[in-house]
Amino acid sequence: MTGTGKLIRLILRRDRVVLPLWAVLLGLIPAAYVASFEELFPTEAERVTYAQVSESNAGFVTLYGPLHGSSLGELVAWRAGFLPVLVALCALLTVIRHTRADEEAGRTELIGAAAIGRHAPLAAAFITTCAASLLLGGVLTAAMLGQGMPAEGSMAFGAEMASTGCAFAGVGAITAQLTSSARSARSIAIVALGVAFVLRVGGDVSALGNGALSWLSWLSPIGWVQHLFPYGVNNWWPAGLTLLFTVVAAIAAAVLLARRDFGAGLLPARLGPASASFGSPFALAWRLHRGLLLGWTIGFTLLGLIFGGVGGSVVDLASDNEGLGDIFARLGGSTALVDSYFAGTAGIVGLIAACYAVQATLRLRDEEQAGHAEAVLTTAVSRYTWAGTNLFFALLGPAVVLTAEGLATGLAYPQGDLGAILAGTLVQLPAVWVLAALAVLAFGLIPRLSGVAWAAPALCLLILLVGQTLQLDQWFLDLSPFTHVPHLPGGDASATPLITLTVIAAALTATGLAALHRRNIPD
Amino acid sequence: MIEAIDATGLVKRFGQVPALDGLDLHVATGEVHGFLGPNGAGKTTTIRILLGLMRHNGGTVSLLGGNPWTEATTLHRRLAYVPGDVTLWPALTGGEVIDLLGRLRGGLNARRKAELLERFQLDPRKKGRTYSKGNRQKVALIAALSSDVELLILDEPTSGLDPLMEEVFREVIAEEKRRGDRTVLLSSHILAEVEALCDRLTIIREGRTVETGTLADLRHLTRTTIQAELAGPPDGLATLTGVHDFQLDQHRVRFDVDTDALEPALQKLVQVGVHSLVSQPPSLEELFLRQYQQADR
Ligand SMILES: Nc1ncnc2c1ncn2[C@@H]1O[C@H](COP(=O)(O)OP(=O)(O)OP(=O)(O)O)[C@@H](O)[C@H]1O
Ligand SMILES: [Mg+2]
């Protein structure tokens, strides 16, 4: 562990922008909900109605977790129930970035030759990420206190997010030991997070019914932290359980690290074919993108099944509760409750598809940095062909996954109109393309800063999460291409915004490709 | 006959910093041309310009009679490139990469591939991420050498190869040379390799060509070291133009002398009377060291 301190300073220097950004920004989001909930439900009675409706709504429970109470704090903490997943994602990506990704790139080896212990890089990445999680929790607690919320609840709320971050720093630390590539480590860790989320959803939704499977929530760290119930019972022991999990995960990662060779993973490498059955730029792009496409298609199908399955309970809710439509109307939905539910999920799905599109587009940059672009471009393949074959998958892959999601939603909600649901999903595509096109532009014009392409989906997410609730200015909401997408089913099916977005995407892509055609490779 | 590579006064700047500053490189068709220079001299940059990966800021360049930037794709059918630092797609096997690059180039000689796999002792079934540095280098070499192309551009192709494999590489290039239908540009830091393979060579430093010619031409530029025991004091020898590092210890002398000044220096010795004489021929290492360090000349 010698040298851990030095490495922590190195990480803080390399991540001096990104680390505070996620720790502070995510920590501030719940405080923003306080004011908006006060405004939407000014009286105790209204909050009680809303809470009663929400706590038995499978859709809400799926998205935000269980709700047990109607005080302002409880509502805010519950509505922030998607945060643990985001915190977990940031934490595991940070750990992998400073462990396996560095090792794969050979940077660890440079450092390793200096007087630095074998476990130091892992310890440094893990400690820094846990510290960032604690910072996030601290920011959250302080911001909630600043909004005049009760002290114990605010601390429990902060502890919920901080312990989530630590637990998934542990998950990232373990997966970083398993494979020799950072990309696979990330995939495994994200699948683990997905499983934790699905277990949590399964248990919580089951608890709404006969509760036969409610124990599923207790298999998932995400489930644990959502049973802290800040501002309500202030249950502290699940945070303890999560920290215990963190310690066990960290020890497990350290043991795995000690058992493997430098640069290697624990999963064995297999032999492959001695000659290629393919030999075109398109086939190469397919090889590079197919894993990504398959993974996202499976994920989107599951998401569609969940969203569709929950659709039924939204209907029950509408028929059971007079006056609920009123509440939904105030939340920004249309009068047709189910339509607004599916239009809402389509927006979420569109944004996730945009993340896939940006990721797939930036594969071009990965290929350039790894030196693979140089190998291909010194054969008879032109830059346009090389970029074009990759973009084919980056732009049409999202169409495939959106279709899968729409179909799965329709299948899981047979009483609905499949065509309308599918249309609601597919109209997201032009907005997805705009974000992908921004990534192409960044890759062409400012290749070394290609990563800024992620700022666009991050901004759109921010607008989606807090834009409506905070009633931000329209021009700010208009920055997100998703603001302009027709809300289907139910809304106006106008083609104009779709055409406009597609034209913008095409223009941005063309500009990016023209810049790529003129620049140095590698840059 | 058109030169395979014809670059004159090449300038390339990265921002304000010039990487190439009037570089000349002329490679005749059919020759093996050594391309040498200290680290950071601009070899890789020159090669990237020749490959149309980077655009030059000044000077003229033609490759196989064409413009390497605008006609990149058509020219690339006629050449193969081995980068200095080979990286492979982690999920593709070595054999797949060899086939893929060959086909993207427009064709691969399967017999030649099998033969080279054998000679370089490479297992083509391993995944890219599991190869060692030397084995990655072999994958790129086999991919390039088993393509039927006119021009091979090799950027430090043997870095990471063990001595045995380096020997195989030399044999293969020597065979190519005997067949005489290929031009090779070989950037290298290994002098023995250059000496064994190259017809002509170009030495660059800080983005400029400092020397170009055959090995024999270059040897001409070197100094012979002479040690002699004389009958008397060698008056005037120390100040003779072309004599360097002159040391006198009673009647023993030791000095370096330029090839041009060899005759007058020897005449001076003979005038005094020579008891014994040892002459050391110029070594290639010495030549390179001198060219590489010319900054402090
Ligand atoms: N993309 C780039 N951006 C900025 N500077 C660069 C870039 N590529 C090369 N350089 C600079 O150009 C100069 C020449 O580099 P080059 O890689 O051509 O040297 P080289 O002769 O191949 O060296 P070596 O023997 O170490 O391979 C160096 O000073 C290097 O720092
Ligand atoms: Mg180089």
Image (cartoon, coloured by chain):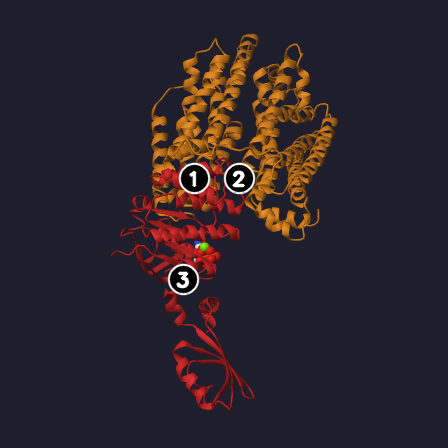
- Furthest-left residue in view? B1
Picture coordinates of residue A211 (x, y %)?
A: 67, 12
- Label 1 secondary element: helix
Judging from the image, what is the letter of the chain drawn in red? B
* Quadrant position of the N terminus of chain B in the picture: bottom left
Which residue was labeled with disc 1? B114
Q: Confirm or deny contact between disc 3 and disc 2 (CB under 8 A).
A: no
What residue appears at the point 38 percent right and 78 percent down from the top-left corner? B260
- Kind of residue indicated by mark 1: Ala
Up the image or down, B89 lies above or below A350; here it is below
Which is more foreground, mark 1 or mark 2? 1
Which residue was labeled with disc 3? B207
Chain of the residue where label 1 is placed in the rendered structure: B
Q: Is residue A359 visible?
A: yes
Which is more foreground, mark 3 or mark 2? 2
Judging from the image, what is the letter of the chain drawn in orange? A
